[in-house]
Image (spheres, helix red, strand yellow):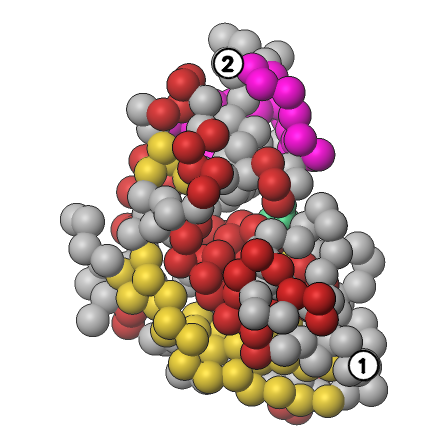
């Protein structure tokens, strides 16, 4: 139940300016972040407060960059209706989505950092989409001065969050006031948290639990999210089982 699950990755870059045509260096830095965050190798993992050390988890996934596909386009905002995933609509069709994580890097617009498709949807649109200025982390780049990255979303955690959705994880507040993320060991949150909440931020939901604001599935700043839980690990890994919607990856 704890073997390393291998995730081949294809990154599809669609750009309307040279800045948006991000470097291979910037792309590789995002793969480093995914490997660290999904293997509990992130340096901030040790910041998880004592309240949650018993439930913090090593998800145990290994991401390998297979190829980069690039396309120039006159379109400067792609929205959230999957046009970037279709060559007919000016985008790039996914590469072998049943056994590859496709990531589209393009400007979404409307202040949206990224979005993802949950497991069980159409393979033609499967994967995650991230804006170029939220993709990667200068810490892991050979030439960081040239990177196109915007604080406070410059540590590559947008991809960590979106890949969490792609692995069936819900927002920690359950997209409702005191809603459920269908995971038992994550506390009930009032709503999304932003910025960098103070320690021991309490929920006003039933039982007034301390909120797990440092969970990747909240909305806090990149520097303030650094853990998945054991319950999230169980939920995410279930979809890679031989009878699950992402069985093609468990080879
Ligand atoms: N889907 C979210 C959005 O676009 C992504 C939030 C990512 N959060 C982060 N700290 N990088 O609004
Ligand atoms: Zn989200
Ligand atoms: Ca929960």
What residue is at 59 percent from the left and 36 percent from the top?
224
User: Mark 2 to mark 1: distance in Å?
Assistant: 46 Å
Instruction: Return the residue at label 2.
Output: 209
Mark sitting earlier along the chain (2/1)? 1
Residue 222, quarter of picture: top right
Which portion, as a residue range, is magenta? 177-201
Q: Residues within 10 Å of mark 2 (few under 14, many from 20)?
A: some
CA neighbours of label 1 inside 10 A, class few (<14), some (14 to 19), many (20+) = few
Q: Is residue 88 above or below residue 189?
A: below
Of the pair 121 and 56, the residue shown nearer to us: 56
Q: Confirm whether residue 121 shows in the render.
A: no
Query: How far from the left and from the top, in percent, is residue 137?
Result: 59, 58
Q: Residue at x 36, y 45 (%)?
A: 40
Percent coordinates x, y for residue 48 in the rendering: 45, 28
Image check: 109 left or right of 130? right
Q: Position of residue 152 (x, y in %)?
A: 71, 46
């Amino acid at each position: 139940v704890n073997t390393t699950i291998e995730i081949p990755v294809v990154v599809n870059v669609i750009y309307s300016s040279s800045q948006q045509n991000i470097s291979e260096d910037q792309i590789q830095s995002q793969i480093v972040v995914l490997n660290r965050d999904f293997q509990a190798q992130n340096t901030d993992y040790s910041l998880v407060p004592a309240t949650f050390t018993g439930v913090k988890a090593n998800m145990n996934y290994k991401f390998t960059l297979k190829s980069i596909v690039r396309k120039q386009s006159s379109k400067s905002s792609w929205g959230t209706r999957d046009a970037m995933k279709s060559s007919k609509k000016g985008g790039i069709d996914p590469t072998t989505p049943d056994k590859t994580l496709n990531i589209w890097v393009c400007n979404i617009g409307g202040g949206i950092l990224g979005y993802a498709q949950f497991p069980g949807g159409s393979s033609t649109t499967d994967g995650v989409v991230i804006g170029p200025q939220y993709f990667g982390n200068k810490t892991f780049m050979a030439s960081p001065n040239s990177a196109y990255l915007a604080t406070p979303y410059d540590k590559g955690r947008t991809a960590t969050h979106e890949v969490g959705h792609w692995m069936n994880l819900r927002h920690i507040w359950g997209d409702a006031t005191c809603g459920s993320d269908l995971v038992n060991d994550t506390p009930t949150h009032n709503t999304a948290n932003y910025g960098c909440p103070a320690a021991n931020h309490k929920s006003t939901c039933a039982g007034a639990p301390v909120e797990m604001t440092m969970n990747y599935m909240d909305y806090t700043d990149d520097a303030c999210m650094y853990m998945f839980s054991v319950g999230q690990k169980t939920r995410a890994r279930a979809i890679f089982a031989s009878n699950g919607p992402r069985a093609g990856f468990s080879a």
